[in-house]
Amino acid sequence: MKRITRLCLAWILAVCSVLPVCAWAVGPSVADTMRGIVDRLYATLSEEQLVGLDQAAVDACITNEEQQILATKYWYFDVNVPVVVSVMRDKAQLAVPFWLPAAGFEKTDLEVRNEEYAYEVWRKPFAAGRVELGINGFDKHRPHYFVCVGPQETGAKLEITNCYPANQQILEMREGSTIYHDWSELVLTRVPEELKGQVLLPTIRGRAREAHLIEAFRRTPFPSSEKPDQVVLTWSEDPRTTQTVQWRTNSSVETGIVRYKKKDAGENAEWREEKANFETIEDLFVANDRYCHHFTATLRGLEPGTAYVYSIGSPANGTRTELSEFTTAPNAPAPFSFVFVSDTHNSPVSGALLETALERHPDIAFGTNAGDLVNTGQYRDDWDQLFAHSKDFFKQRPLAPVIGNHDDIDGLGADLYLALFGLPANGPKALAPERAYSFQYGNAFFLMLDSSASIEDQTAWVKEQLAGCTAVWKFAVFHFPPYSPDEDYPEIRREWGTLFDAYHVDLVLSGHVHYYLRTYPLKNGQRMATPAEGTIYMISVAVPERGLKRKAPEYAAAADFSGVPLYQLFTINGNRLISRAYDAEGKVCDELVIEK
């Protein structure tokens, strides 16, 4: 089955639905217009010129008709009474969006603020009917502008309908209001009196990418070719009897087959074959490798606890990879180990750390990553770097990842993460398949959650999973840490932490804050005497980080703020668990032993 994943244009604004479904205008969209512009740039400019594109080059290549679409079809809605529309634009953005003064908006002396940014206010009166607004600019400026609307006549009842993008949220313009759906903690701290009480229309920071052209084109250091690469093992079904294999080629290759057999079957044993499905991955702005094909095959009917050798190739061109191997999970509980990292950010340092972990501990069964696998989840070249830096680990040991905020950056979605990893589709119905999932390996159960999505939408599923779990060991893995001195996530503690307490999850593995921390056993936020009475929370980071001077919180049993990248090795043998944190040189920086 062939599918196309396109990146960087026409992002869906997925927010709480509080308005009627839009009556969208018929005609060219911003996405169509931008694709036409980009196609024309590819046809007329060299790779060097694309990468060096500046404002003058952009202005020279866009027609008047295209400017009109970009000025009017980006954000629009209907009002039932005459209004004044205010556009709040970040003062740090160097270039004023071309359409603002051209459409008759006037800059005022008003200023709106939150804890991070100061916004200048541009205003314009509109008659009842359609209000049309344009792009944030051709640069990728964070933060995006936002809007408030007030009636021209005092006391008039304002109704806003037929919005594009759909599912536009409506709030009140006041201190404490959220302006970005992807950063709900960032609220307004200063609102001029004349704007208070008006209708506030929030947005997402990432919308600026819909018209991004200046410094948008990139080169991948690892372009695709006819030969399969980026081989990654995951589980999408039972780890005892299946193995999912993924890889990449360039867009000329449309067939892929995995050949495999038992490792100890002998040279004359017959090879089994499994055909792969592929989808076309398009990153519009990877100038030297715009398209590639991503293949996925799931091998079924395997024997538990068995080593297999495999290779990947295409009958069409005769290419084939060297033999590699994987081992299925045991049918009955047996001793095993796994490695845990977080915040790899497609760094060569974190890649080398994972490769070193495999060399140092060749009995590792699999690896898990608590999110922020890459810097920018919508950039395919970032994923190219991640896979290249850890290629030996990924082709020999399954990876069980979760989504971090960088993998789902600026509210733009995790489409590329979901396209590149075949994961179990057994998660909450309220989330897209594979954003959250669970699996069991030996006598350990793993609950893989998406802390970038709605926490509450996953709570009932978490309860159901834990209530039915009979495994000796229970792990929860997700990106945002419930306990850390830098970031506070009361909703996670309230929605999930109470369930971890009720069903005794042994360990919660997280990242995000870029240092190492291990808590004492905690229950309802209070320190317990033994691991049997509470949950231990761990934070880790696999990239070098600036050392932080801070005092460890009272709930921390161990903490390392030095900025040294670490990986954790968990070894489970029946009722005994050992966790050790290692640096790149093999030094044990922390150790935990739990006996049940």
Image: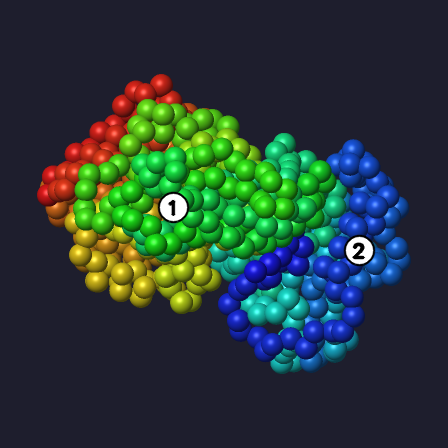
Quarter of the image with the N terminus is bottom right
Q: Given the image, on which type of amino acid does mark 1 rest? A: Ala
For image coordinates 69% across by 59% down, the residue present is: 87
Which of 23/334 is in front? 334
In the image: residue 54, left or right of residue 301: right
Q: Given the image, on which type of amino acid does mark 2 rest? A: Gly
Which of 286/324 is in front? 324
Q: Secondary structure at mark 1?
A: strand
Which of 441/33 is in front? 441
* Quadrant in which residue 221 is drawn: top right
Q: Secondary structure at mark 2?
A: helix
Contact between labelled residues 1 and 2, with CB atoms less than 8 Å apart: no
Instruction: Say above or below: 55 vs 79.
Output: above
The residue that label 2 is drawn on is 36
Distance (Cα) linking label 2 and label 1: 38 Å
* Quadrant in which residue 108 is drawn: bottom right
What is the x, y in percent for residue 159?
Answer: 63, 78
What is the x, y in percent for residue 225?
Answer: 64, 38
Instruction: Say above or below: 154 vs 390.
Output: below
For image coordinates 24% across by 59% down, the residue present is: 466
Other-residue count near label 1 (Cα within 10 Å), few / some / many at <14 / 14–19 / ≥20: many
Which of 42/558 is in front? 42
The residue that label 1 is drawn on is 400
For image coordinates 51% across by 67% down, the residue present is: 16
For image coordinates 66% across by 69% down, the residue present is: 164
Tell me if residue 444 can be seen.
no
What is the x, y in percent for residue 253?
Answer: 64, 46
* Quadrant in which residue 285 is drawn: top right
